[in-house]
Image (tube, rainbow, N blue to C red):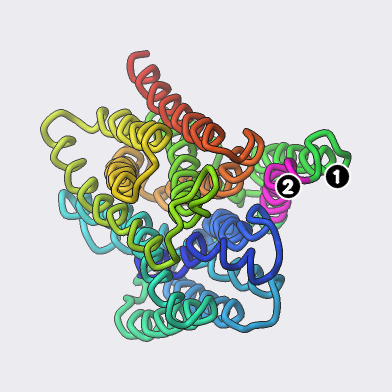
Amino acid sequence: MTTVTAVVSSLGAPLVPQIAETHGVPISTAQWALTVTLIAGAVATPVLGRWGSGRLRRPVVLGGLATVFVGSVLSALPIGLGPLVAGRALQGVGLALFPLAIAVARDLWTGPVLVSRLALLSVTTVAGAGLGYPVTAVVASGFGVAGAYWFGALLIGLTFALAFRHLPRSTTGERPQRVDLAGAALLSAGTVALLLAISQGDRAGWTSWPILGSAAAGVALLVAWVAWTAGPARRRGHPLVDLRLAARRGVVGPNAVTFGIGLGMYGLLALVVILVQGDPHSDIGLGHDVAVVGLVLVPYALLSVSGNRLARVVAARWGPHLLLPTGCAVFASAMLLLAFVHHHLWQALLVMALGGLGSGFTFSSLPMLIVPHVPRAETGSALAFNQLLRYLGFSVGSAASVTLLDAYGGDDAAFRATALTLASVCLAAGCGVLRRKRS
């Protein structure tokens, strides 16, 4: 379930240049076909996490899959860029099903088997995204953009049928938790406003009133969300996420790394798509079609799974404290390699393999690091907040990578500067975890 929903939700990055050409919009605007999916996943994750507690878990999962199906159909219809973006937002709900899958796993397994299942489930979202790109590319090369989304609708329809038949019903009698809809509205509005400023600032002018106003509104709304979550929502007993739980010792470090590596991950994916599919006569571009773009991302998916297995070996032999710093360092090395070596296709393949190893190594370790530090009853809330940070990082990376490339000048030197900027974010996240461990 988590792999298929991640595959469908990732039906965006390889198609961004084609969407821009089809609808006559800049790349930074077409990038919203990917960014809006990640924002929807970020906001829907804590909401579905609360709605899906106890006996409502099964209907919430099935309802989420049905929503993704509707979004896939809407994205496939040739009725304009607006409906496509709206459909992609509905597809993002599929990304919110991950914490519910974790909760099901914790109900079914314990001990080492649970740790193994948590690591595998965590890496499925990364591997699923990597698998989604070549699937998108192959289908789109034969049937166009609409064909890729119709294929996604077929996958989700089959997944819904399997989930309807095999997903266990909850045996607990827990009441469904109340959902902080006001907090969800503040978070989503603030994120969209801030990312609009980030993605459109280079075109409209960073000092223009629309951009400054959008950025200020985004920051104000996010500050208001934090104040609301820590104040009235907490007193009423139903905050969107428990910020106090997120600030616990042993949880802060993984959460910080989640945002940083998420930003770097989607920044890397966006840059590689631009590189491989770009005009070979320009400063940046190898001139390959969408099918080659998808195949370039296959090593990312494969090495993500390998990173999961390697992380378990390292944790068993040297302890889990090395997992996050090592994963950040490996991923940053992929960004550094991309910055200085990006003139041939095999180099892009090598970069994606190294990036996949770092991503799989990092993301697979997060549940095993967070779960021991939170009460069993709060597992879903803690993982939902971590997932929220992951998708917010994805959203920022998706929007900021294209913006940075334009802001730095759009040439080969700008490509290098963008990759180095993203590498520094990953290194900073890893160094921050090391410093907290030493203190």
CB atoms of marks 2 and 1 within 8 Å:
yes
Q: Name the residue under label 2.
A: 200
Task: Give the amino acid type for the residue marked by disc 2 in the picture.
Answer: Gln
In the picture as drawn, the residue positioned furthest to the front comes out as 281
Q: Residue at x 69, y 42 (%)?
A: 198
Q: Closer to the observer: label 2 or label 1?
A: 2
Q: Position of residue 380 (x, y in %)?
A: 43, 53
In the rendered image, which quarter is residue 243 located in?
top right
Q: Position of residue 179 (x, y in %)?
A: 62, 59
Which of the pair 187/29 is nearer the observer? 29
Looking at the magenta stretch, what is its main secondary structure? helix
Q: Which residue is drawn at 64% across and 36% down?
A: 409
Q: What element carries label 1?
A: helix
Left or right: where 297 falls relative to 33: left
Q: Few, some or many C-alpha atoms within 10 Å of disc 1 (few <14, some 14-19, many ≥20)?
A: some
Disc 2/disc 1 C-alpha distance (Å): 10 Å
Specify start and end residues of the magenta stretch as a single range. 185-203
Q: Mark 1 points at which residue?
A: 210
Which of the pair 160/200 is nearer the observer? 200
Which of the pair 314/273 is nearer the observer? 273
